[in-house]
Amino acid sequence: MNYNWNWGIFFQPNPMGTGTYLDMLLSGLVLTLKTAALAWVIALITGSIVGVMRTLPSKGANWFGFAYVEFFRNMPLLVQLFLWFFVLPEILPKAAGLWLKQLPNAPFWTAAIGVGFFMSARVAVQLQAGISSLPRGQRMAATALGLTTVQGYRYVLLPMAFRIILPPLTSEFLNTIKNTAVAITIGLLELTGQARSMQEFSFQVFEAFTAATILYLLVNAVVVTAMRFLERWVAIPGYITGK
Amino acid sequence: MFGNLDFDVIRRALPYLFYEGMTFTLTLTALAALGGLIFGTALALMRLSGFKILGRIAGVYVDFMRSLPLVLVIFWFYFLVPYIGQWVTGASRPISVGAFASSLITFIMFEAAYFSEIMRAGIQSISRGQPAAASALGLTYAQTMRYVVLPQAFRNMLPVLITQTIVLFQDTSLVYVLSITDFLGAASKVAQRDGRLVEMYLFAAIVYFTISCIASYGVRRLQARIAIIR
């Protein structure tokens, strides 16, 4: 392979004047994590609401949950980001559109919201599966004790369901981190974006992508380990994973 | 709100969008699904084989691919494939690979990791008695897999495999980062040429949505039918 390897490139100053190339990649990593964190908060909150709606006895709520999930699952994430970024400011009333366009850090907010809503549909499906995997008697017992629907969910169904779906939620969280890379298309300089611009400035393609790959693998390992501790900590006694 | 939209721009771009763009997207989806399924099944068989080392290699490959963002993998292969081509053919310089070949290789390698997990679950869902019966009949390992295990595993997992292919169909839009003219790429080129981002992106969204919706409705029907057979 006639490729000029130069692993020292990471310690050379980058053309942006923000330190070395390594600093550039690390700032990308920080942005990836920030975007993923905000997106995950959105996904978890919205996804939980929609997931609960899909298990409510009300037909209307069911239908809304179904339509919501289908809407966000049947469009590529890239197209959804384009809709949030290019289309939304145009179809809003003029003043609101202008405000959106002039927003500082627009790619960051768009990416977090876009990825967040995209992932919320997946969280909703997982939570619905978790709630319906509970024995029917639990819901009935909650009613028999005189709990209202809200109380039943708050004190009986949700604490169980969330613990059961913790493993699939972990992989959805990892997907959220990976999906932030799509935001490179709307100009967000997250980890993949920084690796790409490092490649364009320095022509050291494989060093840049190797570094990004290693950083993604590290983040993955940290999240998986942390979630395993969390799983053990909240395990339900009596279940296979329980104490 | 929608007053100053020009929907005629879509009508004029239709031939370009579908003949160039959608053909690319659908061909890439079909070939990548086929290649990913074959390679993924091989990975699943490696993982379930008695050879520890083979299983380890397949496991590491699958975990590695699944922890990277697809966009990064697309970039990796885009730059790596010319060098691999040079190494294979013994040429003196990195060979140039077309956009289609490069993205096809990327998606086969990437999707194989996901297909392999599905096929592994499918193979493990076959009861232990079946391969035992097959070897009692004197079938070799290859024959057991070919005639007994894989056909059933494939049928059991068909809904999941198609769902994964729908995901793949949506993911092919990410070749946008290489400025390739797939369906979204074509829409975006027209959008930028005519300054009609809103119309083109809305139309692209509707087309992706319609195709994926019809396909996932088909999967639900299929699932219901398979559920009756069991």
Image (cartoon, coloured by chain):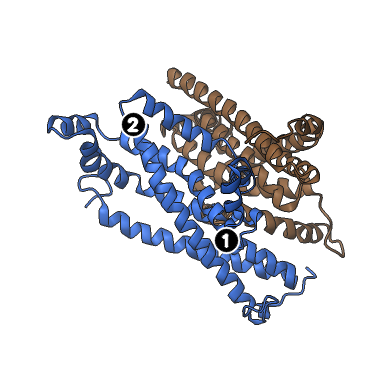
Chain colours: A blue, B brown
Taking the spot 59% from the left edge, 35% from the top edge, the residue there is B166
User: Residue reaching furthest right?
Assistant: B92
Location of mark 2 (residue): A55
Which chain contains the residue that carries disc 2?
A
Q: Mark 1 falls on what kind of element?
A: loop
Q: Can you say whether A87 is above or below A229 in the image? A: above
Where is residue A113 drawn, in percent x and y? 51, 50
User: Residue reaching furthest left?
Assistant: A145
Q: In this view, does A238 lie to the left or right of A101?
A: left
Q: Is residue A104 left or right of residue B50?
A: right
> Would you say residue A148 is visible in this rendering?
yes
Where is residue A50 drawn, in percent x and y? 39, 37
Q: Can you say whether A111 is above or below A90 in the image? A: below
> Would you say residue A78 is visible in this rendering?
no
Where is residue B145 drawn, in percent x and y? 55, 35
Which quarter shows the N terminus of chain B? top right
Q: Quadrant of residue A206?
A: bottom right
Where is residue A232 drawn, in percent x and y? 28, 56
**Residue type highlighted by circle 2:** Thr
- Who is closer to the viewer here, B60 or B148? B60
Label 1: few (<14), some or many (≥20) within 10 Å?
A: few
Location of mark 1 (residue): A105
Query: Mark 1 or mark 2, which has the lower sequence index?
Result: 2
Which chain contains the residue that carries disc 1?
A
